[in-house]
Amino acid sequence: MTPGNTSNEPILGIIADRRLLLSILSVSFRGLTALFVVIAISRVLGVSGFSDFTYSLVAGTLLALIVDYGLELKLTRDAALAQHQLSELTVRTTLVKMLLALLAIGFFLALLAFDVLDQGRYPLLVAMLMAQILYSFSRHLLVPFRIRSKY
């Protein structure tokens, strides 16, 4: 950089590198935290309890994939292009998400009726499925705030 040059390129490069470093650290610490939580849960619940928990978590997560379907990304993209229609877009995608949640719950009940899922773990399966669905809705309903930068 020459004395008369006021270019901000090196400064922006430093900021981008710092953001990348902070992002990598954030993801790494989140992964380590999840690992320690899993280890703690396995120690507290024991082998049998941890296997019940893991089975229910995986089954609930797989069934909740129906609800996630990508509507959060669609709402983010569409709302960024048309912020004046944010309310309409949010209502429309939330109604679709509710329909998908009902389909997931219906599919879950059908799996229980046909004895595909272990009915002995029914309360834990219901809890994990509902937790995954509610988590999906909470992420979805935060999108309008993220779009408007009003976290």
Image: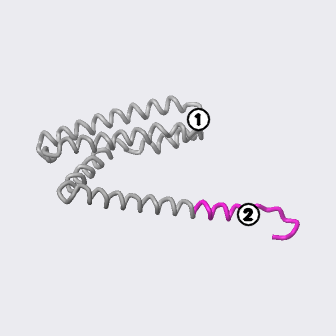
Q: Residue at x 29, y 56 (%)?
A: 41
Q: Residue at x 57, y 41 (%)?
A: 80
Please, what secondary structure does the residue beneath circle 2 have? helix
Q: Is residue 7 one of those drawn in magenta? A: yes
**Whole-percent x and y of residue 40?**
31, 58
Asked whether, in this view, residue 71 is left or right of residue 83, the answer is: left
Can you say which quadrant of the picture contains the N terminus? bottom right
Q: CA distance from mark 2 to mark 1?
A: 31 Å
Who comes first in sequence, dot 2 or dot 1?
Answer: 2
Q: Which mark is residue 70?
A: none
Provide the major secondary structure of the magenta segment.
helix
Q: Are marks 2 and 1 in contact (CB under 8 Å)?
A: no
Please provide the residue range marked out in magenta: 1-20
Mark 2 vs mark 1: in front:
2
The relative height of residue 32 versus residue 126 in the rendered view (above or below) is: below
Which one is nearer the viewer's eye here, 99 or 133? 133
Asked whether, in this view, residue 83 is left or right of residue 92, the answer is: right
- Residue sticking out furthest to the right: 4
Callout 2 environment at 10 Å: few (<14), some (14 to 19), or many (20+)?
A: few
The relative height of residue 108 versus residue 19 in the rendered view (above or below) is: above
How is this picture coloured? one colour
For badge 1, the amino acid type reads: Gln
Which one is nearer the viewer's eye here, 150 or 81? 150
Asked whether, in this view, residue 20 is left or right of residue 43, the answer is: right
Count of numbered tags: 2
Which one is nearer the viewer's eye here, 46 or 14? 46
Can you say which quadrant of the picture contains the C terminus? top right
Q: Residue at x 36, y 39 (%)?
A: 134
**Whole-percent x and y of residue 103?**
27, 36
Classify residue 139 by image quadrant.
Answer: top left
For badge 2, the amino acid type reads: Glu
Query: Which residue position holds label 1?
Result: 83
